[in-house]
Image (tube, grey):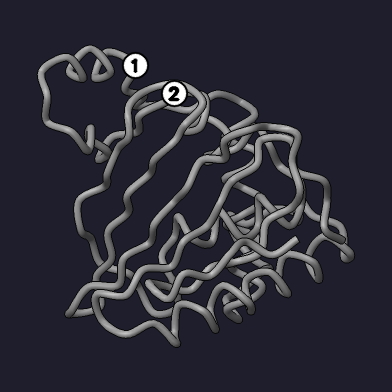
Amino acid sequence: MLVYANGQGAHLPCFDSTVATLMEMRFIKLPGNRDAIEVVERQRGPDIQRAPRETGPTLPHDLAHAAVESALGIVDGFWGAVDEGAVFEDFKPLDPNPRHRRSELKRLSAVGEREALAEHKVSWAHRVWSGQRTEGRGLGASPLTQNELECASSALNVAYEKWKALPVMGRLVWRWAPDLRRSC
């Protein structure tokens, strides 16, 4: 199922879900090769935002997470944790209302084993997709099968094309479904 398009930004595909509300991630393309993120309608916790930071040579790192975690059906990675209420280092409540300051207590400075495995898979998929080295000192073996690499690369291609096509100040909207089915 494709997520609706409303003319305000590019919408990426997500999969049908039994959940009534899906978390929405808004990746905002800023001037100077920077990006920001707004996250709304999480299962737990207030709406949050991440301050602008450098995008890098291809696409925002957190967008790569959304693409790969969705394509591989990883529900307990970075975006799954965010949907469940986790607030990572540089995210803050979207609404500065003092009642949301308690969410700061749930801020995570470290990730659990499952999130670390998801990070490893996303980083490896991005490394292969972007043509970085995959052999040599400090890299170890791939955590992904060949089929998973192909699937992740395809998802990264779609995310990259959507990101590249956005004008400055454009928004790429991704709906997260916590019970995703593998797309390939």
Q: Position of residue 108 (x, y in %)?
A: 36, 24
Q: Quadrant of residue 161?
A: bottom right
Amino acid type of the residue that numbered disc 1 sits on in the rendered structure: Lys
In this orientation, which residue lies closer to the viewer: 169 or 137? 169
User: Which image quarter holds the C terminus?
Assistant: bottom right
Residue at 56% x, 54% y is: 66
Between 107 and 149, the one lying in front of the other is: 107
- Quarter of the image with the N terminus is bottom right
**Residue 121, relative to residue 23: is it above or below?**
below
Q: Secondary structure at mark 2?
A: loop
Residue type marked 2:
Gly
Q: Is residue 183 left or right of residue 47?
A: right
Q: Earlier in the sequence, mark 2 or mark 1?
A: 2
Rendered residue at 65%/57% (across/down): 68
Residues at marks 2 and 1 touching, judged by CB atoms closer than 8 Å = yes
Residue identifier under label 1: 106
Disc assigned to residue 49: none
- For residue 85, the mark is 2
